[in-house]
Image: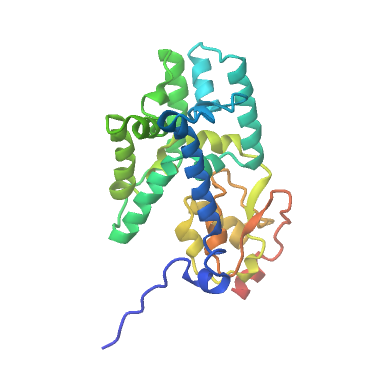
Amino acid sequence: MSQIAQKPRIGSEAIKAKGWWRAQRWLILRRLSQFSILALFLLGPLAGIWLVKGNLNYSLTLGTLPLSDPYVALQSLLTGHVPEKLGLIGVFIVLVFYALVGGRVYCSWVCPVNLVTDAAGWLRDRLGIKGSVHLGRQTRYWILAMTLVGSALSGVVLWELINPVSMLHRGLIFGLGTAWTVVMAVFLFDLFVMSRGWCGRLCPVGAFYGLLGHFSPLRVTAKQRQACNDCMDCFEVCPEPQVIRPALKGEGKGIGPVILAPSCTNCGRCIDVCAKEVFRFGLRFDNPPSTAGKAESKVE
């Protein structure tokens, strides 16, 4: 009686080839970043240690460094409320930072809701839940536009009424309450309704930061794409898998190996799970045009 060969676990080949740490490095560093940022915000209200005051919308670190979410600040401006001087300085600092490192770095390295959606994705895979509602990736941009127009018309910062990041923060401080309803809704949506649905299709914050970091110099590059063996692990772990193929396969005349799509979150998971070390972090300027797209496909 023949046995059906089981597909190797995603990343298992990378662990064998590179070792456990290098096959998990960027994931672990991301989790450390997310939990550390969350802990800094919770230390004050929960332990009385006020290194950081505020939340991800606006914070003041050590009483000196202001950081303001430009998306929330823009909505506030549209309602007719001009941020104070410190708030404007905080907006400028955040704008410059994410313009350099990539706007959607916020989604993968900072946003605590990413922990919720990743947990839903992990459980979805373990339970073998298949099928998904279809929503276009442009949906999040429509929601972004509606929050801005709605804020201008209503005089209310609309996104803050349902912002899962703010709700999660309140829930952790004040305990069980209505705030957790929104967070649980995001978890259940990604678990049962649509894989990677919240971050990939609905969240206007990701859409905003994607636009902000459209021309950021820091990028993931498939520098060694000729070594690709089509294992597909990078596509399996990528929260925005559509961004990989053009750079990896050199599809189209003159397509270089750098992933230029603003939807890329620079999470580094493709770097982790690739046993052939095809991917690495690099600069958008180091993107020589492909002259071997067809030749590469023959090698593969």
Is 125 placed left or right of 143 in the picture? left
Q: Which of 97 and 300 is in front in this view?
A: 97
The residue sitting at 29% across, 47% down in the picture is 193
As displayed, is residue 235 above or below residue 105? below
* Residue situated furthest bottom in the rendering: 1
Residue 195 at least partly seen: no
Which residue lies at the image location 32% right of the left edge and 51% below the top edge? 132
Asked if residue 241 can be seen in this view, the reply is: yes
Question: Quadrant of the rendered structure where residue 97 is?
Answer: top right
Whole-percent x, y for residue 95 in the image:
62, 30
Please name whichever residue, 120 or 52, is drawn nearer the observer in this view of the structure: 52
- The residue drawn where x is 64% and y is 22% is 89
Q: Residue 157: x and y, percent?
A: 43, 19
Quadrant showing the C terminus: bottom right
Looking at the picture, does residue 189 appear above or below residue 235?
above
Query: Horizontal and vertical percent for residue 295?
Result: 66, 70
